[in-house]
Structure formats: C-alpha cells, structure tokens
C-alpha cells in the first residue's frame, strides 16, 4: 500500500474543529469530483486545516486505487 509521507488521513480529522461544512467534507470524501476530473482549490488563513484535508483526500484516493500527485 502506498502512503503520503505525512500520514495525514481522515483518522486524525476532527469535524468539530473544521470550518468546512460536514456535508461538503462528506461529498469531497466520495471522490466523485476526482472521477469527473474536476479541480479542488482550498484557500483560507493559516492553521485552518487545508493541508490536512487535502492530504487526507489524497491518501483516500490512494487507498481506493487512484494515483495522486502532490
């Protein structure tokens, strides 16, 4: 199994600390947007979890047999 070097996955994601609506996070985790070859841009202040969210999505894609480029 391939892993990103940081080990950031949804196992460490705390929904209560996120400003991203739960419904949005749930949709992103389906990876349907990846299968449709759509882009995702995350922007916001430092320390808001953007990198953790994106790396967790990348790891989920790897776990589902997709390739990922960081």
Image (cartoon, helix red, strand yellow):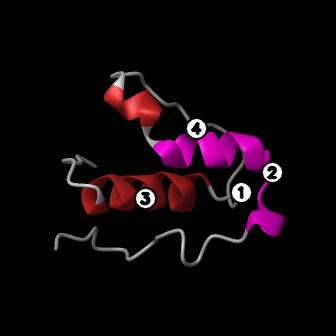
Tell which of 43 and 1 is nearer to you.
1
What secondary structure do most residues of the magenta stretch adopt?
helix
Residue 20 lies in the magenta stretch? yes
Residue 48 is labelled as 1
Mark sitting earlier along the chain (2/1): 2
Q: Give the extent of the magenta segment.
A: 15-30
Q: Secondary structure at mark 4?
A: loop
Viewed as shown, does residue 8 lie left or right of 66?
right
The correct choice, above or below, for 32 with respect to 19 in the image is above
The quadrant holding residue 7 is bottom left
Residue under the image location 36 percent in, 74 percent down:
6
From the image, state whether disc 1 or disc 3 is nearer to you: 3
Mark sitting earlier along the chain (3/2): 2
Report the Cα–Cα distance between label 4 and label 3.
12 Å
Q: Position of residue 50 (x, y in %)?
A: 59, 52
Report the Cα–Cα distance between label 4 and label 1.
10 Å
């Amino acid at each position: 199994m391939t892993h990103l070097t940081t080990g950031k996955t949804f196992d460490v994601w705390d929904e209560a600390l996120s400003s991203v609506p739960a419904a949005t996070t749930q949709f992103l985790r389906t990876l349907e947007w990846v299968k449709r070859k759509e882009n995702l841009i995350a922007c916001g202040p430092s320390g808001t979890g953007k990198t953790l969210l994106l790396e967790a999505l990348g790891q989920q894609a790897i776990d589902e047999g997709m390739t990922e480029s960081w």
